[in-house]
Image: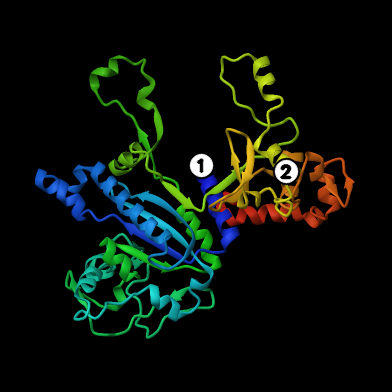
Amino acid sequence: MRYMFNNCQDAMAICKRFGYPDLFITMTCNANWKEIQDFVTPRGLRADDRPDIVARVFKMKLNDLMSNLKKGKIFGEVQAGTYTIEFQKRGLPHAHILIWLQGEGKLKTGDDIDKVISAEFPDPVLYPALSAAVSNYMMHGPCGFANMNYACMKNGKCEKFFPKQFQNSTTIDEEGYPKYRRRDTGVSVTKKDIVMDNRYVVPYNPDLLMRYHAHINVEYCNKSNSIKYLFKYVNKGPDRVSVEISNRDKDSNKEKGVDEINQYYDCKYLSPCEAAWRIFGFYIHDKWPPVNRLSFHLPNEQSVTFKDHEWIDTVVERNQDMDTEFTTWFKANQESELGKDLTYAEFPQRFVYDEDKRIWTVRKKGFSIGRLNYIPMGTGELFYMRVLLTIQKGCTSFDSIKTVNGVLYQTYKEVCYILGLLKDDREYIDGIKEASDLGSGPQLR
Ligand SMILES: [Zn+2]
């Protein structure tokens, strides 16, 4: 849970820095990929017999995709990206990817969207291969009356509103939702006796589809109200199942002492493919640029690590004068003016922390986003210190955080009052606001 929460906060830190993501891409593993089939077919196997091969091949393709996105080969310059891997029960892996485009490349109009996303068949004469790929991988359904059991069907209706309506141009409605161009061109494919035309095409990017030959849905997503939904999607927990271990063997009834009969386990369900993924140590989440979780503490309240057999005196002695990531931030500011205009969370933009040497040095390359660890409000002074750390720049000591216009105050809470940060329940409002960026209704309550 903590892990999920951190990932969500990391994604929010990227949002705070770069705004809302521009593209939401879902890449689904294709069991017929040549790399998989080349292995299983000669051995008389099927793809599900070798989840390890499926996991490896999907990881290769995903790495290639992410690297092409990062290098700007598909959608132009990209500022940031995240992915989350999901496994359907007994199913194949798929990746949910969020992409933040560079300023000029941002999609603002219907025409901009048309350049990177299509929801139509291409001309089958001019582009036969692409046309075949669209009909193989990008058709939704058939669902509805043709197949009431299709995954998208909820209460007798297609949850994804297919078939869509014909539409001559791509538009973005007032709420920021796109309606993709789907012209009535007469091009169609017939599946299960259903004639499927442009109204059934799942939005895709032609370049991605031709490169990876898999179901790769690309959606425009620069709309504020969808962000929570996206993060819920991207940070959803693994499927859980309750398992009852019951002993149905009659003979064992004689040994009544065993409690296991009525034991329930709350288990996490892992599909074979997910198990292989985790055994290989592949990431479930990844992102760039890196998000730096910054630790901070009140004077002498830093956490220290020690081995359980160590003497307390040794531990104290070793740690008492040892600097932390936080206190070395003070030191860096004492020694250099370079970070004078930066808050603690902004500091990693220009400096890198060396954990072994315990020093911050000037960043030579790359980029990193910092974020302060979350502190619940009930924590008292540490909470108020965190509030101040989002404002105070270039701090050189604990006292400097408590100093405003040359006056040193007693407590962090007092400074928050002086600066008007606690007026009109603002701390509560800000707290709820921050939580509302991250959580769904039930989580908030
Ligand atoms: Zn449907």
Q: Which residue is mark 1?
A: 3
Mark 2 Cα shell of 10 Å, populated few (<14), some (14-19), many (≥20)? some
Q: Is residue 52 left or right of residue 368?
A: left
In terms of sequence position, does the residue under pointer 1 or pointer 2 come before the other?
A: 1
Q: Which residue is mark 2?
A: 383
Residue 370 percent location from the top left of the image: 61, 49
Q: Quadrant of residue 356?
A: top right
**Residue sitting at x 54%, y 78%:** 174
Q: Nearer the viewer, residue 238 or 221?
A: 221
Task: Decide: is 123 above or below 31.
Answer: below
Residue 155 percent location from the top left of the image: 36, 63
Mark 1 Cα shell of 10 Å, populated few (<14), some (14-19), many (≥20)? few
In the current view of this chain or complex, which residue is farthest to the right? 407
- The type of residue carrying mark 1 is Tyr
Q: Quadrant of residue 224?
A: bottom right
Identify the element where label 1 is drawn.
helix
**Residue sitting at x 34%, y 69%:** 205
Q: Is residue 214 visible?
A: no
**Residue sitting at x 23%, y 70%:** 135
- Number of labels in the image equals 2
Residue 19 percent location from the top left of the image: 57, 63
Q: Is residue 382 left or right of residue 364?
A: right
How far, Cα to Cα, is label 1 from label 2?
21 Å
